[in-house]
């Protein structure tokens, strides 16, 4: 099962959807929470950000300081403009859950494909469902 760290607001209840298909989701309320989850022995497979971009930029700066290779996914707001190059995936507002679940899975798969610098590796179970760590 893939382990995802979520930072930000979940007013759209996306975390419930992620958990319903098998993702383990850790909710972070602060940079201190994020630091704790990143330092755990079972490293996360992805970081998902949602909410205001100011908070997202602080998280990206923190993540850069850790040098932890991790795909970063953003659920963007309806009126936000962001630099998509800062993220591995940007999911626009009003994207259907079936579409963003598939895009998240594919992003995580692509990120770990062929990487040898990671102690844990995401491996998909089968299309449309979360994967496993080996």
Image: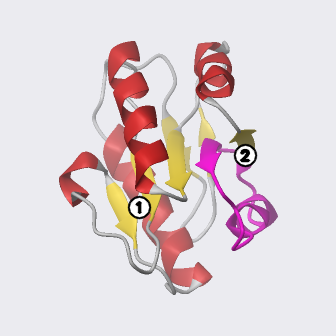
Closest to the observer, 84 or 116? 84
Q: What quarter of the picture does the C terminus occupy?
A: top right
Q: Are marks 2 and 1 in contact (CB under 8 Å)?
A: no
Instruction: Specify how the rendered protein is coloured.
Output: secondary structure
Q: Position of residue 102 (x, y in %)?
A: 50, 71
Residue at point 31%, 51% (across, down):
88
Query: Badge 2 local density, few (<14 within 10 Å), some, or many (20+)?
Result: some
Disc ID at residue 25: 2
Q: Which residues are magenta?
A: 1-24
Residue at point 25%, 47% (across, down):
86
Q: What quarter of the picture does the N terminus occupy?
A: top right
The image quadrant that residue 38 belongs to is top right
In this picture, is 21 found above or below 69? Answer: below
Dot 1: what SS? helix
Mark with earlier residue (2, 1): 2
Closest to the observer, 31 or 67? 31
CA distance separating discs 2 and 1: 17 Å
Residue at point 60%, 80% (across, down):
97
Q: Nearer the viewer, mark 2 or mark 1?
A: 2
Residue that label 1 marks: 106
Q: Position of residue 64 (x, y in %)?
A: 33, 24
Query: Badge 1 local density, few (<14 within 10 Å), some, or many (20+)?
Result: some
Residue 15 falls within the magenta-colored stretch: yes
Residue 12 falls within the magenta-colored stretch: yes
């Amino acid at each position: 099962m893939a382990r995802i760290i979520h930072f930000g607001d979940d007013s759209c209840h996306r975390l419930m959807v992620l958990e319903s298909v098998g993702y383990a989701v850790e909710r972070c309320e602060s940079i201190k929470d994020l630091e704790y989850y990143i330092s755990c022995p079972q490293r996360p497979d992805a970081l998902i950000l949602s909410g205001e971009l100011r908070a997202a930029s602080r998280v990206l700066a923190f993540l850069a300081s850790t040098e932890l290779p991790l795909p970063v996914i953003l659920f963007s707001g309806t009126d936000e403009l962001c630099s998509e190059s800062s993220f591995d995936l940007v999911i626009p507002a009003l994207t259907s859950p079936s579409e963003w679940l598939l895009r998240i899975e594919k992003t995580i798969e692509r990120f770990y494909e062929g990487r040898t610098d990671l102690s844990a590796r995401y491996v998909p179970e089968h299309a449309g469902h979360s994967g496993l760590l080996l």
